[in-house]
Image (cartoon, helix red, strand yellow):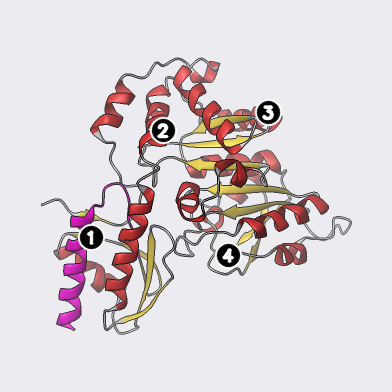
Amino acid sequence: MLPVDLRSDTVTLPTPAMRAAMAAAPVGDDVFGEDPSVNALEERLAAMFGHAAGLFCASGTMANQIAIRAHTKPGDEVICDEGAHIYRFEGGGTMANSGCSVKLLHGDRGRFKAEQVAEAVNDPGNPHFPVSRLVVVENTANRGGGSIWNLEEVRRIRAMCTDHRLAIHLDGARIFNAMAVDGRTPAQWGAPFDSLSVCLSKGLGAPVGSVLLGGKSFIAEARRVRKRLGGGMRQAGMLAAAGLYALDHHVAGLSADHQRALHLSLALKALPFTEEVLPVETNIVVTRLAAGHPVKEFMAQLRRSGILVAEFGPNLVRMVTHLGIDDDAVHRTVQALEQIGNEK
């Protein structure tokens, strides 16, 4: 029996139909701008989110790092939440690739307020401080347990950024998960941002890829940065075709992922050694275990039942539902959790 892999929504495998679409994709040299499938994906997402142009990238990390480099210059400062992916999980790229410092905000499960940003902006006339240049929002917020941003708050942050001449970027790693809950359109979510990265390899189930969106001059600079980072892919249309297929066929299934995550959260709350389960809004379940039950022991117990989960910090475990998790997989996981609970 195959394991139930809840470590991340990045572990999905392309479906047979997606593989067929990839195999049939028309391709060309994307570095020359001649791959029709890549061009179609970039143009489609740009139109959806109301931006002028797009750039296909190998990963969400690459798209975010290119955006930071294109918006800033060495010595500038980037403002984000303390749990932001660009700070926690991108290998120090903001500092290494762009030479920028980072100012961390203490938000509510990854979501901060416009007033917090205003307080964090440095005086541009004071040479002791780095120049505040960019604000980054992550939706959904991974460290916040898949928490969803309020669009009205983002609009207030946008207005504040305009007043202070800051750019604002959306790390849209799971933006389609957010829209499946809040009912907003891609154009509504694209409007407040100077740039955004849209990931295709998480909830949408593509094997590779994110698209960076923005204005024409911004994307032209981003293309140069991508080349500098070694990210110019040639016949990438087979990868882009997976993204196009995902947009057509996998968006509707995200709500089912969310329901399965909620089911898992209820089983976790019933365990005698569960201290806290973060509110489940989308497809991520983050659980804090009591001090007397080590995370590694819990993971090993689940692994013996064929259930894979991820350690997410001190006493923290993360489970993520996705295209590869069906109702039977959730049932198996709940049974394993109940068995562990009974053993205690």
Return the mark for residue 82: 4
Q: Which residue shows up at 48% across the image and 24% down it?
A: 38
Q: Which residue is mark 3?
A: 216
Residue type, label 2: Gly
* Residue 15 visible in this rendered orientation of the protein: yes
| Residue found at the far front of this picture | 183
Q: In the rendering, at what x and y percent does residue 65 appear?
A: 57, 43
Task: Pick the residue in front: 124 or 264.
Answer: 264
Front position among marks 1 and 3: 1
Q: Secondary structure at mark 4?
A: loop
- Does the magenta run of residues contain 323? yes
Q: Which residue is mark 1?
A: 330
Q: Are marks 4 and 1 in contact (CB under 8 Å)?
A: no
Q: In the rendering, at what x and y percent does residue 261 appear?
A: 33, 61
- Mark 4 crowdedness (10 Å alpha carbons): few <14, some 14-19, many ≥20: many
Q: Which residue shows up at 45% across the image and 60% down it?
A: 146
Q: Are marks 2 and 4 in contact (CB under 8 Å)?
A: no
Residue type, label 3: Lys
> Which comes sooner in the sequence, label 2 or label 3?
3
Determine the image quadrant of residue 213.
Answer: top right
For residue 332, side relative to residue 272 (left or right): left
Front position among marks 4 and 3: 3
Determine the image quadrant of residue 154.
Answer: bottom right
Task: Pick the residue in front: 231 or 55.
Answer: 55
Q: In the rendering, at what x and y percent does residue 239 appear?
A: 39, 28
Placement of 61 over or under 55, stated as above or below: below
Residue type, label 1: Val
Q: Main secondary structure of the magenta part?
A: helix
Placement of 238 over or under 13, stated as above or below: above
> Which comes sooner in the sequence, label 4 or label 3?
4
> Which comes sooner in the sequence, label 2 or label 4?
4
Return the mark for residue 243: 2
